[in-house]
Amino acid sequence: MKKYFKSLVITSVILIYLIIIAGAVVRMTGSGMGCPDWPKCFGYYVPPTNETQIQWKPNYQYEKGVIVIKNESLRIAINDFLSTETYNPKNWNTYTKHDYAVFNVWHTWIEYINRLITVLSGIPILIMFILSFSFWKEDKKIPIFATITILLMLFQSWLGKVVVDSNLLPVRITIHMVVAFIILAVLLYILFRSKETIPVKHYSRTFASLLVIATFLTLLQVALGTQVRQYVDEQIKLVGELSKSEWLNPPNLSFYIHRSFSILIFLINGWLLYESQKHKMKLKKLNWALLIIALEVFTGILMYYFDFPFLSQPIHLVLSSLLFGLQFFIVLEVFKSRKLAAQK
């Protein structure tokens, strides 16, 4: 079964990226509250497709936990019951976790698909976790980090519930995003350890240290970007979804810091690429890293100067996640090569 392990890890990494993409689409479309409860959606495992499904109906068999919108508020069924000709408040409790009582079929299904992808990603990760123990004798870190992955996925699922219950509190959204990147890093570490051979090369301490700094700055940049997105969300509430030119007018401090960091990240990665080529390190992944950074800057320019073109926001986030994953893998390779070179 060991021969399938690497494929499972790669599949898990791809699915984590899909989760990040789905989350970005949810944020772009404002679909985060498309399902008011968690893990169900309006009390159903398969969400409603029509507003009439979540409106109170007479002579209808309701199940415990089903949510309806009544008088512009959410009501949740206390028990299974058959409704009468008139609404009986004794059968319902007011949903108190938040007061967002809006139904939009597109928002509901976008959020549902996001949750579905998250659930599906757990399947290969669970199988990977089970198979990881076959490596116990030869490399104990593989099952240990596979266990950490499972625990992080459980925490991420719980955090998803917390985000919904808080009506998309920005700080919790940021934590939710950072945890996704941490899960990605752990999976990449497992993938790296399952590689058969690592080329032995000599990298300077300065080069290796700057690689770590560049990777950390990318993670910090993502957190800053989430804060900018928070400001945009607040602006949308004030000026409306159609007034895109006003979403960053005026820009806040987080935006200027985020933009300045992109310049710093480009310069650091540009120096790393220069050093790699100068000393013939053959780190081709650095070429890809710089290309991704350039594309990130380009999508950032599109959003600011061209009023958030369609899909520019999720593409911007996906590029940052690809950059982080690539940088983290380069860090693993460089530090392993340094360790092997020191042993010779």
Image (cartoon, rainbow, N blue to C red):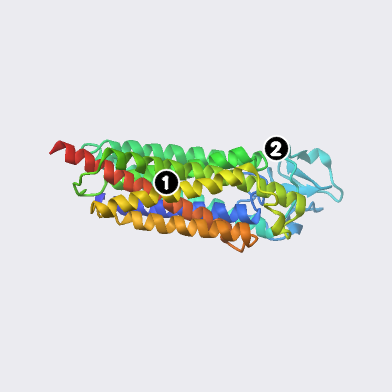
For the image, the number of numbered tags is 2
Identify the residue position indicated by label 1 in the image.
184
Instruction: Give coordinates of residue 99: x percent, y percent.
Output: 75, 42
* Mark number, residue 139: none
Q: Secondary structure at mark 2?
A: loop
Q: Residue at x 20, y 49 (%)?
A: 199
Is 338 rendered above or below residue 281?
Answer: above
Q: Looking at this rendering, what residue extends furthest in the left direction? A: 344
Q: In front here: 72 or 343?
A: 343
Identify the residue position indicated by label 2 in the image.
97
Give how far apart the Cα atoms at labels 2 and 1 are. 30 Å
Question: In what quadrant of the picture does the C terminus appear?
Answer: top left
Kind of residue sitting beneath label 1 = Leu
Kind of residue sitting beneath label 2 = Lys
- The answer to the question of whether label 2 and label 1 lie on touching residues, with beta carbons closer than 8 A, is no
Res. 285 image quadrant: bottom left
Q: Residues within 10 Å of mark 1 (few under 14, many from 20)?
A: many
Residue 39: tell me if it is visible. Answer: no
Instruction: Give coordinates of residue 271: x percent, y percent.
Output: 36, 49
Is 62 rendered above or below residue 209?
Answer: below
Q: Residues within 10 Å of mark 2 (few under 14, many from 20)?
A: some
Q: Residue at x 50, y 52 (%)?
A: 19
Is 30 rendered above or below residue 253?
Answer: below
